[in-house]
Image: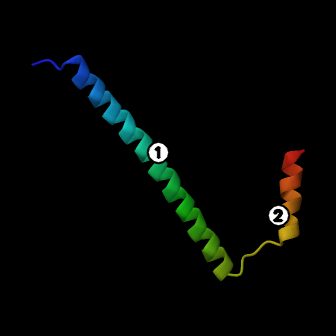
Amino acid sequence: MPQSSAETSLQASRYRLLLVLERYLEAKLRYLREIDEGIADVEAGRLTDLEIVKAKWKARLR
């Protein structure tokens, strides 16, 4: 039996919601991995002086 317009619309809405949720979770997981990488860098002694970081940021703004 063919789907009604309401059923099709609901199915499309659910699909879009799942896509948005998947993208959100991927972004959050990427963010957490980057934090873990930063912590590993600190634990390994791989640090960058704050003044060097600030200089790079300022250079990007130009």
Query: In the rendering, at what x and y percent does residue 15 appear?
Result: 33, 34
Measure how far apart labels 1 and 2 are at the Cα level: 29 Å
Of the image marks 1 and 2, the number of the one nearer the N terminus: 1
Query: In the rendering, at what x and y percent does residue 21 appear?
Result: 41, 45
Vertical arrangement, residue 5 with respect to residue 38, above or below? above
Vertical arrangement, residue 11 with respect to residue 31, above or below? above
- Residue at the image position 51 percent from the left and 56 percent from the top: 28
- On the rendered image, what quadrant is the N terminus found in? top left
- Residue at the image position 14 percent from the left and 17 percent from the top: 2
- On the rendered image, what quadrant is the C terminus found in? top right
Left or right: where 10 falls relative to 21: left
The residue at the far front in this view is 6
Which amino acid is tagged 2?
Val
Q: Secondary structure at mark 1?
A: helix
The image quadrant of residue 40 is bottom right
Q: Secondary structure at mark 2?
A: helix
Asked if the residue under mark 2 is in contact with the one under mark 1, i.e. CB atoms within 8 Å, the reply is no
Vertical arrangement, residue 49 with respect to residue 15, above or below? below
Give the residue pinned by disc 1: 23
Give the residue pinned by disc 2: 53
How dense is the environment of label 1, judged by Cα within 10 Å: few (below 14), some, or many (20 and up)? few
Query: In the rendering, at what x and y percent does residue 18 appear?
Result: 36, 41
Left or right: where 21 falls relative to 44: left
Which amino acid is tagged 1?
Arg
Looking at this view, is 44 or 34 the one in front? 34
